Image (spheres, grey):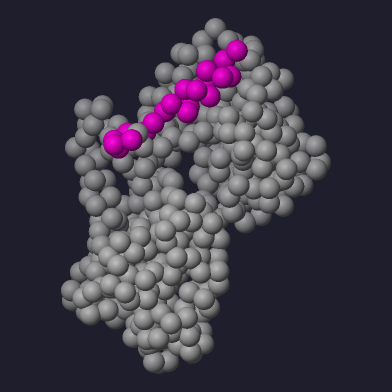
């Protein structure tokens, strides 16, 4: 099938390449000329495991191309909207300018029988509004939320754990068309739900709100564990055996970040207020506050371990991306803590296997190390803030030979405390003793 994907950021570029890899003829469209030139040359503008190879292969096979011209979508039958929906500046609500601009760009090229597919995360009610805007084109709108995890985006696109179609009419021909687009997943009997627009829009933000709540819950418990001497990791293991709760997303640490969870829960709460039901999601404000408080806790812990002042003290920050297997530093707790320590006068040396270049573009004033060894050399305190495997597997004996003082703050509770303590380190985690 001939497909267009409007918006070639993280979501759109991965979706375009994944669709091309299963045999569709795909054109990726974006207004950013530099991004389009980079993608067209087979170079990914971000780090995502497996994506570079997928991009190179699908371009080479002739199934994928990129352009800045929306007119190139005219031959496509299915058009995906995959643009960003960031927070509005100074507000919590979602900024839908890019979604509306994408619709404006496509409308002149839509024809009867076309299917316009929304992938972007939007406030409930957006799809109904956009469906009205394309009335008269003969095209039909479907809302098909994405459920990508950074670091697993290629696999999540090709082998999703569920597919959701939000439609105006459950008997719509658009359902069969999208089934043909996603034919490998459909043939693999991936659970598929056909529902109304509002439900489809709420699925993504509700899932993110639940995950954010689970993370903030265990982080709140970690504060109590610190106050009482309990071990939050063992506690999470114990309650995780309960099938109603589960162990995933119960790792206490510096909290969540990235381009989805923080802005999505804020936009969700904001939309509830606009609908006159702000009380229903008031708890999400507390979830957000707990999450941000974790950064304060780690900053305070670092300061306390260095005797109450970090001025002039050399601190090795290990991790800048908001999660491992990504170079995304948007709303990253790790980068935020590095910046806080720098602002307090510390001699911060930061290292991340993939996110140094990303962080440096926005914060060139920080000092970045080219290697893990360079970051550790002469450090008076080491803080692990992103749980990259390279850091989790770090040998405490080898690390001790590089640092000036063997003190480590485990901001992700990802290290083996006993192993580090037995090898002469002062170890501090969150809610962990």
Q: Which residue occupies the extreme top position in the image?
A: 136
User: For residue 367, which quarter of the picture?
Assistant: bottom left
Is residue 397 something one can see in this rendering?
A: yes
Q: Residue at image x 33%, y 76%?
A: 313
Query: In the picture provided, is 136 more to the left or to the right than 279?
Result: right
Residue 424 coordinates in the image, percent (x, y): 39, 92
Q: Residue at image x 37%, y 76%?
A: 314
Is residue 77 something one can see in this rendering?
A: no
Q: Is 197 placed above or below 214 here?
A: above
Q: Nearer the viewer, residue 405 or 264?
A: 405
User: For residue 64, which quarter of the picture?
Assistant: top right
Q: Is 181 placed above or below 416 here?
A: above
Range of the magenta residues? 89-108
User: For residue 227, which quarter of the picture?
Assistant: bottom left
Q: Is residue 248 magenta?
A: no
Residue 239 coordinates in the image, percent (x, y): 33, 67
Q: Nearer the viewer, residue 185 or 31?
A: 31
Residue 34 coordinates in the image, percent (x, y): 62, 38
Query: In the picture provided, is 324 more to the left or to the right than 44?
Result: left
Residue 308 coordinates in the image, percent (x, y): 21, 76
* Tally of numbered discs: 0
Q: Residue at image x 66%, y 54%?
A: 50
Q: Which residue occupies the extreme right position in the image?
A: 61
Quadrant of the image for the N terminus?
top right
Q: Is residue 101 magenta?
A: yes
Q: Nearer the viewer, residue 110 or 113?
A: 110
Q: Residue at image x 42%, y 73%?
A: 316
Q: Main secondary structure of the magenta part?
A: helix
Quadrant of the image for the C terminus?
bottom left
């Amino acid at each position: 099938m001939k497909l267009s994907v409007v918006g070639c950021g993280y979501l759109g570029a991965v979706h375009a390449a994944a669709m091309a890899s299963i045999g569709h003829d795909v054109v990726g469209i974006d207004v950013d000329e530099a991004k389009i030139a980079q993608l067209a040359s087979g170079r990914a503008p971000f780090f995502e495991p497996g994506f570079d190879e997928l991009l190179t292969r699908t371009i080479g096979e002739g199934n994928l191309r990129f352009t800045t011209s929306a007119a190139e979508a005219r031959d496509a039958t299915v058009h995906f909207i995959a643009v960003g929906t960031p927070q509005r500046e100074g507000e919590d609500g979602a900024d839908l300018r890019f979604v509306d601009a994408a619709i404006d760009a496509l409308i002149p090229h839509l024809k009867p029988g076309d299917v316009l597919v929304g992938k972007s995360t939007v406030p409930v009610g957006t799809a109904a509004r956009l469906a009205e805007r394309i009335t008269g084109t003969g095209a039909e709108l479907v809302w098909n939320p994405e459920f990508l995890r950074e670091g697993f985006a290629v696999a999540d696109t090709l082998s999703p754990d569920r597919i959701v179609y939000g439609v105006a009419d459950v008997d719509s021909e658009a359902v069969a068309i999208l089934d043909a687009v996603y034919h490998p997943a459909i043939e693999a009997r991936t659970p598929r739900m056909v529902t109304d627009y509002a439900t489809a829009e709420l699925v993504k933000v509700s899932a993110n709100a639940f995950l954010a709540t689970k993370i903030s819950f265990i982080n709140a418990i970690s504060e109590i564990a610190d106050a009482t001497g309990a071990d939050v990791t063992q506690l999470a293991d114990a309650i995780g055996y309960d099938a109603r709760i589960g162990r995933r997303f119960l790792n206490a640490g510096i909290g969540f970040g990235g381009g989805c969870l923080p802005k999505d829960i804020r936009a969700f709460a904001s939309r509830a207020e606009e609908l006159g039901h702000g009380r229903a999601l008031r708890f999400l404000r507390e979830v957000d506050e707990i999450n941000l408080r974790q950064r304060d806790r780690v900053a305070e812990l670092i300061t306390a371990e260095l005797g109450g002042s970090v001025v002039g003290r050399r601190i090795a920050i290990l991790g800048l991306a908001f999660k491992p297997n990504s170079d995304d530093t948007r709303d990253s707790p790790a980068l935020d803590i590095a910046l806080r320590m720098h602002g307090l006068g510390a001699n911060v040396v930061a290292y991340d296997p993939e996110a140094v270049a990303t962080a440096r573009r926005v914060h060139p004033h920080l000092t970045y190390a080219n290697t893990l060894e360079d970051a550790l050399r002469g450090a008076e305190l080491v803080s692990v803030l992103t749980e990259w495997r390279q850091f989790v597997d770090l040998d405490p004996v080898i690390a001790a030979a590089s640092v000036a003082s063997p003190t480590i703050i485990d901001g992700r509770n990802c290290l083996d405390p006993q192993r580090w303590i037995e090898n002469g380190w002062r170890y501090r985690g969150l809610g962990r003793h």
